[in-house]
Image: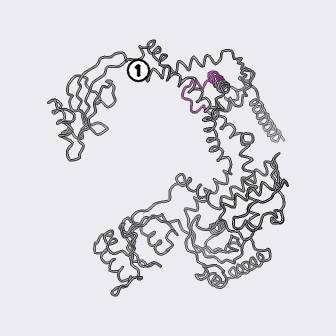
Amino acid sequence: MIRVSYLIFLVTLCFSNFCKAQQLEDKTLLTVDGIEFDAGTFMRVYLKNLDIVQDDSQKDMDNYLELYVDYRLKLLQAYELGLQNGDAYQKELLSYRNSLAESYLTDNEVTDALVKQAYNRMMEEVNASHIIVNVLRTATPADSLKAYKKIAAIKKQVENGADFATVAREESEGPSAASGGELGWFGVFTMVDEFENAAYGSEVGQISGIFRTDFGYHILKVNSKRQTPDEVTVAHIMTYDQRVDTTNTAQQRINLIYGQLEAGKEFSAMAREFSEDINSSRNDGKLSRFGTGDLNTPEFEQAAFELTEINSYTKPVQSKFGWHIIQLLEKHPTPSFEDSEPGLREQIKNSPRSRKITDAFTNKLIAKYGVQLPEIDSYTKKFPQVTDSLMTGTWTNNVRIKSMQPLFAIKDQSYVTNQFYDFISQKQLKDYGKYGDLEEKLAVYFKDYINASLINYYDENLERDNEDFAFIYKEYKEGLLLFDLMEKKVWEEAKIDSTGQQDYYNSHKDNYRWKRRLDIVLTQNTTSAIAEKVRDLLQEGKTVDQIKEQLNDKGRTQVMVSKGVVEESFPRLPENFEVKKGVSRVYEKENNGFYKVVLVNDILEPSFKNFEEARGNVINDYQQELEKKWLDSLRIDRNINVDENVFTQVKEEIENKRS
């Protein structure tokens, strides 16, 4: 009893703290000219930026509050100047908004799960046989039931001990029946989704459950599984019998070539001379990189995968194309998940399994918005204006009177029949799918219309309905606005105000000084011997061009030379460089691999930089002064109020979250 009471106390305490935090987030922390800013936004911004702030003073919450006030004052001025209405601003904001929204208009959990599943399946291949009873998804219920009963009877046969291959030859209605239903090795994305799931979900020797695809009802038997072989790059030498040869068959010719290879002949030379694959023989027999199933010749692939040593080659191998000797050039191990992930996401996005993501996402939206979808027994009766011309993609919406019959509603927005007609008249133009009849096509189109309507509605209301999106989008919107404001008020003004720049330079001339400078010729040499020659030539008064012409002969660069006036702290000068006029000694090889010799033509003592020499630093410093004056001006005539009680609570809450 005591334990139960203690647990109730803990739950009550946690709930009360949660409510307290929620109430605190909604409280007004800052007011500027009557405009209120809540504590929750301040806390979220502070905590988000905490790890990237380098200046410890900005981590102090009192100091950070001052920065936050400045931030709000800048934004108020930006809005007062109407910068949010600029065409360039609106265009860039729209582009960012569309890009940001993409990740919110999908079910990321389902996508992540499909990506991980695909990567795991990349590691393994399946060898399977199957039996199919053909029936289209658009078949009548009676025909579907007839097909199902047939596959169920077949399944019972093989489960009772009948040989799978024999039954497949006698009963399967697919092209693989002739080979006992065998499909060979395959991996992820090779088969339709339902087939792949059944294959990877069944154990070796197991008969799968009955499953349906667009082609009909299936059962399959997993014959074997293996680790996916590395993709390979190979070269081959090929012979085939489809040419006139009165002396040797293709097999005899390949055996002769194999004998030459064994005697030490070079593979690439033999491929160029004797391979009858015209396309690859020009390239020393090299083929493009491939994996299982890419070449549609299992014997060739298997022989290539079994090679383990680079440049090793097979004995003659026969395929349906002819006879081959295969040489391994490179193995390509399966990339890491991190490297594979972007490509897998794109494959899933462009494959039929992407519908799983869309359906999961739209089902959540249906629940979120409480959408009541219509029950439709017959789509052709529900939408009689749609004719069979839709099957050829040529249907025209000739409904003269706009049909406002409601189909469904999302919140306060209704979707009516004519909107659906507009949708299908556009969708048919780019739809190359196959459909059994008009009823099936209309059913698919109506489902797609519902999904598109839900996603578009959510997209249009993302800021209202998704707190994370609203925060990130608002942060970018305000950041972009502040950038435009800073450019207008500080950066551009500092660049074009030449009088202000000159005045600032005159007032701060002591900040712009040259350190001691050297007028030098710096040589970097590949060997100590070359460096000694360069030193002698410099002492003789030879010019840079004369030195390079003499030592950089026959296209070999042994001396690299640069010259100019540099400060004595110039990083490319040798370590411990002795500053004096004349030619230096040879400085031994450093980390960059060169031996250096330096000619010091002149030593320039410290002096003031003139305005042109200091202009870049002057503009930067002048910008900072303008920004400071501008920030000070932002508070003039502003009514700024911080609720100290709320700020104290904010400090406590942030400390609790950080600890």
What residue is shown at x 37% (from left), y 69% (from top)? 285
Residue 53 part of the magenta-drawn span:
yes
How would you classify the magenta stretch by its main secondary structure?
helix
Q: From where the camera sits, is residue 659 visible? A: no
Residue behind mark 1: 614
Residue 285 part of the magenta-drawn span:
no
Give whichever of 455, 394 is nearer the camera: 394
Q: Label 1 neighbourhood size at 10 Å, few (<14), some (14-19), many (20+)?
A: some
Q: Position of residue 254 (x, y in %)?
A: 36, 79
Q: Is residue 179 left or right of residue 411?
A: left
Q: Position of residue 580 (x, y in %)?
A: 23, 22
What residue is shown at x 23% (from left), y 45% (from top)? 556
Q: In which quarter of the image is residue 529?
A: top left
> Which residue of the protein is positioned furthest toward the bottom in this rendering?
246
- Above or below, 565 relative to 335: above
Q: Position of residue 364 (x, y in %)?
A: 75, 51
Q: Position of residue 22 (x, y in %)?
A: 76, 33
Q: What residue type is labelled 1?
A: Ala
